[in-house]
């Protein structure tokens, strides 16, 4: 069995605790992930919704940088249409420098039209803004003077006084759900993570690996995870926490009489659709092995804290995962 890398994804969605407590608990989880040997901590960016309490991921990740020593981290993803590229270049350089070169650069256009509209961005313009914005950001990270003339952004000889530790720029990441998008990401040297279930994800992984042509890139499966002493205890803890997460996920959509269809509305559906893994250490180890074998992914990304799951339960789940599951895949 080939070694498998492990990461964490966090929406930083709203639970029952005060915001200051939520942030502190998440930082403590990042510290625990650092000590346990997880590769990367990925944080979502969302706006005007209970799904994301870190709408400025750079601020939150600056705190992560100072509370960790080995853990890599980054947004999954920065919503590029919402940023002035020059300011984002500078932020990326600062985060990479503050962490000693541990920053991972996730980028995207945004998938929720309501969030973009609240920020004054037309969803129909978002893809073009994303593509142009990314070109500007990557040019700026390479250093020198930034010159760009485009439809959305113009820069004339702006000196790049900051620079990243990692050259020419930190590793790139995207969320992907289509095989053609996976192949394009691989050709551009971009790592990917997907929330698809096993059957659909297998096609994405195969397209990615076929196009990667030997590049050392990661293709990840993202799953809700909860481990407890028994399957029954894990399910009892996970069910209400997953339901709160789903309510947070759909809260903004529901206010516009809509709902995102590709997400499982209950824990039972999530388990059936292969997008959640819940149980005792033995059960979870077998399930992770099944998911990896079924998809061919080389990166497993767990959501260990979500909804109103108690912090102690999430911390113990993550600790059990690190001690009982991760070593099995390092052989």
Image (spheres, rainbow, N blue to C red):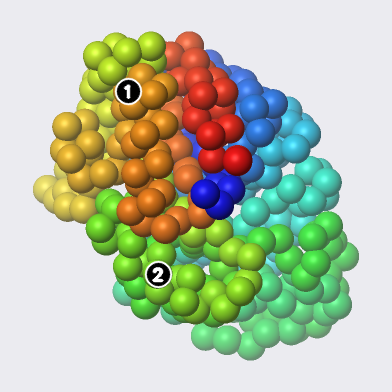
| Location of residue 27 (image quadrant) | top right
Tell me the crowding category of disc 1: few under 14, some 14 to 19, or many 20 or more residues within 10 angstroms, Cα based.
many
Does residue 145 appear in the picture of this structure? yes
Does residue 158 appear in the picture of this structure? no
**Residue at image x 71%, y 56%?**
92
Q: Looking at the image, which residue sits at the far left?
A: 257
| Label ID, residue 56 | none
**Residue at image x 74%, y 48%?**
102
Determine whether, in the image, residue 99 is placed left or right of residue 175: right
Residue under pointer 1: 279
Disc 1 element = strand
| Label ID, residue 206 | 2
Determine whether, in the image, residue 243 is placed left or right of residue 185: left
Give the distance between the C-alpha atoms of the residues marked 2 and 1, in whole angstroms. 29 Å
Tell me the crowding category of disc 2: few under 14, some 14 to 19, or many 20 or more residues within 10 angstroms, Cα based.
some
**Residue at image x 28%, y 18%?**
231
The quadrant of the image that shows the C terminus is top right
56 to 130, vertically: above or below? above
Determine whether, in the image, residue 288 is placed left or right of residue 5: left
Which of pointers 2 and 1 lies earlier in the amino acid sequence?
A: 2
**Residue at image x 48%, y 71%?**
209
Image coordinates for residue 72, horizontal then vertical, percent:
68, 44
For the residue pair 159 and 175, the one nearer the viewer reads as: 175
Image coordinates for residue 226, horizontal then vertical, percent:
38, 25
Image coordinates for residue 120, horizontal then vertical, percent:
40, 61
Determine whether, in the image, residue 314 is placed left or right of residue 112: right
Q: Kindly indicate whether the residue at mark 1 contacts the one at mark 2 (C-beta within 8 angstroms).
A: no
| Location of residue 287 (image quadrant) | top left
202 to 76, vertically: above or below? below
Disc 2 element = helix
Image coordinates for residue 237, horizontal then vertical, percent:
30, 16
165 to 40, vertically: above or below? below
């Amino acid at each position: 069995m080939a070694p498998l890398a492990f990461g964490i994804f966090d929406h930083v969605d709203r639970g029952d605790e005060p915001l200051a407590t939520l942030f502190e608990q998440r930082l403590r989880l990042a510290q625990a992930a650092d000590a346990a040997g997880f590769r990367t901590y990925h944080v979502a960016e969302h706006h005007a919704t209970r799904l994301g309490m870190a709408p400025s991921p750079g601020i939150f990740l600056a705190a992560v940088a100072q509370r960790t020593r080995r853990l890599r981290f980054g947004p999954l993803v920065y919503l590029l249409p919402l940023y002035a590229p020059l300011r984002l270049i500078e932020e990326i350089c600062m985060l990479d420098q503050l962490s000693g070169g541990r920053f991972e650069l996730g980028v995207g256009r945004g998938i929720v039209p309501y969030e973009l509209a609240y920020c004054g961005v037309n969803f129909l313009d978002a893809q073009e803004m994303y593509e142009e914005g990314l070109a500007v950001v990557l040019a700026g990270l390479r250093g020198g003077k930034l010159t760009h003339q485009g439809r959305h952004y113009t820069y004339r000889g702006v000196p790049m006084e900051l620079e990243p530790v990692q050259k020419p720029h930190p590793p790139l990441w995207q969320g992907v759900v289509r095989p053609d998008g996976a192949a394009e990401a691989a050709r551009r040297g971009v790592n990917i993570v997907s929330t698809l279930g096993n059957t659909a994800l297998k096609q994405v992984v195969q397209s990615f690996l076929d196009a990667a042509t030997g590049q050392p890139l990661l293709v990840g499966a993202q799953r809700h995870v909860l481990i407890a002493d028994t399957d029954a205890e894990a399910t009892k803890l996970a069910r209400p926490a997953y339901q709160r997460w789903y309510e947070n996920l759909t809260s903004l959509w529901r206010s516009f009489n809509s709902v995102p269809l590709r997400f499982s509305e209950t824990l039972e559906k999530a388990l059936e659709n292969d997008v959640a893994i819940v149980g005792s250490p033995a059960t979870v180890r077998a399930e992770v092995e099944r998911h990896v074998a079924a998809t061919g992914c080389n990166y497993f990304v767990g959501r260990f804290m979500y909804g109103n799951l108690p912090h102690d339960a999430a911390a113990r789940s993550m600790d059990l995962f690190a001690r009982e599951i991760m070593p099995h895949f390092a052989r």
